[in-house]
Every structure is written in structure tokens, then in C-alpha cells.
Amino acid sequence: MSSENNEETKIDPRVKRTQALIQRSFGELLAEKSFQSITVQDITQRAEINRATFYAHYSDKFALLESHIQQVFRQELEKRTLQACHYSEQNLHALIVTVCDFIAQSHTHCKTSDSHFGLMVEQQVRKQIQELLELWLSKTGTEIEPQIAATAASWTIYGLALQHDQDKNVNKLSAEQFADQVLPLVRGNLHLRPLPLVRQT
């Protein structure tokens, strides 16, 4: 994650501005119509750029979607300073809430139901969950390979958050309440190394 951030800081400011313009225009279009129906021409017209400029930054609209989801979810993590944190039950709880909120928002603000969009959200969000958990586990320690523990937990968090979003029960738990309920299950996937006992003298 830190290497990605370092790469971003090296990007020419003009490139950053153009990419931000494309991303903003794309986000507006996602709120109006399905991803499948959005064309590169729609994006360039909204951003008031030519097609050559678009293709100088993104190979196609699928690459743009991948980048868009990655950036928006990263911003949600940064709002809660989770990328700069270490492992704790409080931070793990906040991560679960963040994923629940993000999935709910992506379905609320984006006028799309096509499978490619859902698959891309899953891939990008799970990837960043896994990377964050690996970072935490590298500092905390785990009884199994950190990558394996982080992979298992990332699948669990995303799957549970998706289930929470799809729950149509009128008495549906809030994201915070849901995180309270599933926290022990997610924590179990991390196989955290037990803290050493401190003998009192």
C-alpha cells in the first residue's frame, strides 16, 4: 500500500488533474446509468476531453472502473486512518464497518446491477482488505502464514458484508451492530499469536 502511495506522489500534477477529472465524470455517470451502458464517449463528453486524452490514461472503461473502485475504497480507509494503524479489535471492527458501508453505498449511488461491476468491486475491495490485514499481521504476528490468514479473513469480511447488504429484514442490524456480531468470526480467521503471559510477582 505504501509503495502505491509513493508512486502516486511522483505523478505529474497535470496528469493527476486530468485523471481526477475523468474519475469525477465517471462517478457522476455511474450514479445516472449502469456501467454496461456507459461508453468512453459518454465519459469524454462529460469530462470535456478528447478520446486520445482518455486513452492516454486508461486502456478502456474497465481499467477506469478498476481504478475508480480502488481509489474510492482507499479514500474510505484513509478517512478512518486504518492504513496508518496497527491491529486491534477496535480497528478490525472499524474495517468491517467500512466494508459494509462501502458495499451499501456502491449499490445506492451506482445505477448498475451488471455482474462485471459487482465482480470488480469484490476483487478490488478484497485485495485492499487483504493487503491491510497482511500489514497488520506482519507487526502483530500470527500462528500461520500472514498471507493465508489475511486471505481467509478478507473473504470472510467481504462475504459477510455482502450478506448484510442483501438482508432485507426490516429489523436489519446497523453496520456497527453487525460488526459486533461477526467480529469473533473474523478474528478467528486471523489465527493471532497469543500474547505472552505476564507473571505477577
Image: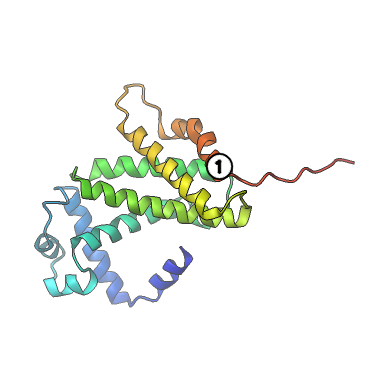
Query: What residue is shown at x 34% (from left), y 52% (from top)?
Result: 123
| Structural crowding at the residue carrying mark 1, measured as other residues with C-alpha within 10 Å and reported as few (<14), some (14–19) or many (≥20) | few
Q: x and y percent of residue 133 in the render?
A: 51, 52
Q: x and y percent of residue 58 in the render?
A: 22, 68
| Residue 62 in sight here | yes
Q: Which colour scheme is used?
A: rainbow
Secondary structure of the residue carrying numbered label 1: helix
Q: In this figure, which residue is indicated by the disc labeled 1?
A: 90
Disc tally is: 1
Which one is nearer the viewer's eye here, 82 or 3? Answer: 3
Side (left or right) of 125 relative to 28: right
Q: x and y percent of residue 75 in the render?
A: 38, 55
Side (left or right) of 126 relative to 56: right
Side (left or right) of 150 relative to 61: right
Asked if residue 20 is positioned above or below residue 177 in the image, the reply reads below
Which one is nearer the viewer's eye here, 53 or 136? Answer: 136
Side (left or right) of 186 relative to 37: right
Query: What residue is shown at x 55% (from left), y 54% (from top)?
Result: 146
Query: What residue is shown at x 21% (from left), y 69% (from top)?
Result: 59
| Residue 50 in sight here | no
Name the outermost residue toward the right. 201
Q: x and y percent of residue 196 in the render?
A: 75, 46
Query: What residue is shown at x 30% (from left), y 55% (from top)?
Result: 69
Amino acid type of disc 1? Gln
Task: Tell me the quadrant of the picture where the C terminus can be found.
Answer: top right
Q: Quadrant of residue 42?
A: bottom left
